[in-house]
Image: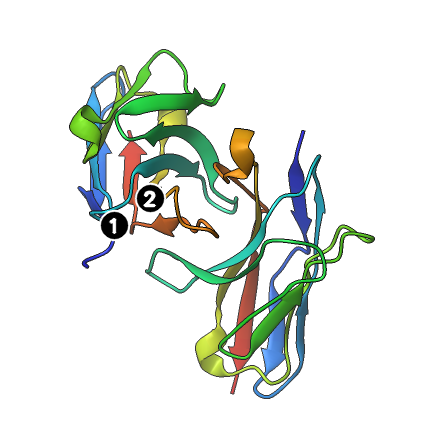
Amino acid sequence: GNSVTQMEGPVTLSEEAFLTINCTYTATGYPSLFWYVQYPGEGLQLLLKATKADDKGSNKGFEATYRKETTSFHLEKGSVQVSDSAVYFCALSDRNYGGATNKLIFGTGTLLAVQP
Amino acid sequence: DTGVSQDPRHKITKRGQNVTFRCDPISEHNRLYWYRQTLGQGPEFLTYFQNEAQLEKSRLLSDRFSAERPKGSFSTLEIQRTEQGDSAMYLCASSFSRQEKETQYFGPGTRLLVL
C-alpha cells in the first residue's frame, strides 16, 4: 500500500542554518504531497503542498519539490528561526475515483529544534 | 470562519466506559475525516464522510468505534468499552470536494486518556 517515510528526529539547528528534512513516498498513481506542521500545543497546519510532478510548493520561506523520479518531497528552508521549532509531517493523499483526494497518509514526523 | 472545532479537548475515562467526541467542520466543507495520532507517530486515518455518507472506514476502526454525521454537518465519534490502547489524540479534518486542489484543515484534536 501507499506509505511515507521521513527522516527521524530530532533535528537540532542553530538560528539561520539551512534546513533539509527528507521525505520519500511509495504510491500507485499520482498522489498529491503535503507538508504539515504542528507547533507546540497547537493543531496540524498545512505548510505547503504540490499536486503533480515537478511542482514546487512554498510558504513562509519553506519549499519542497515533487520529484517523481526519486519519489521524494524533501522540505528545505534557507535560514531557520527559533519560531520554526515544531514537528513537521510529510503526507500524501490517497486518490479515489474521479481524481479527488481523500485520506491522507502521514510519515512519523520530524521534530525540529532551533537554538538561538 | 472559525475553523474546525472539536469538543472536548481532553477526556479522561476509566477502562470499559463509553466516550463520545464531537467535530464541527468549516461550514461550507462537505468532507469530514477522523484520524488518530499516538505519541511519536503521524496521524492515521480512521474514517471519512462526504456529506452524511460514510464512504470509507479503516481496519483500525474496530466494531467498538462508530462515527456518524447526521445531516452532513457536525460529526460524532463514539468509542464503546474503552481500552487503554485507545489512549490517543483524535483529530478531525474537513475539506471541500469541489475545490480544485483539495486541502484538509485540521481541528485542535481531542486527547483521550483511558485509565
Chain where mark 2 sits: B
**B30 relative to A63 in the view: left or right:** left
Residue farthest along the top direction in this orientation: B63
Residue found at x 70% / y 60%: A22
A38 versus B54 height, above or below: below
Q: Residue A92 location, x and y as percent?
A: 58, 45
Residue found at x 44% / y 49%: B102
The residue that mark 2 highlights is: B94
Secondary structure of residue under mark 2: strand
Residue found at x 41% / y 26%: B85
Q: Are marks 2 and 1 in contact (CB under 8 Å)?
A: yes
**B15 relative to A58 in the view: left or right:** left
B74 versus A24 height, above or below: above
Amino acid type, label 1: Val
- Would you identify the image quadrant in which residue A110 lies? bottom right
Chain where mark 1 sits: B
Spatial CA distance of label 2 from label 1 is 7 Å
- Would you identify the image quadrant in which residue A57 lies? bottom right
Residue B4 — which label? Answer: 1
Q: Callout 1: 10 Å neighbours few (<14), some, many (20+)? A: many
Amino acid type, label 2: Ser
Q: Residue B112 location, x and y as percent?
A: 29, 36
**A10 relative to B113 in the view: left or right:** right
Secondary structure of residue under mark 1: loop
Q: Residue B75 location, x and y as percent?
A: 22, 32
Q: Is residue B78 in sight in this rendering? A: yes
Disc 2 or 1, which lies upstream in sequence? Answer: 1
Residue found at x 54% / y 29%: A97
Relative depth, front residue between A35 and A16:
A35
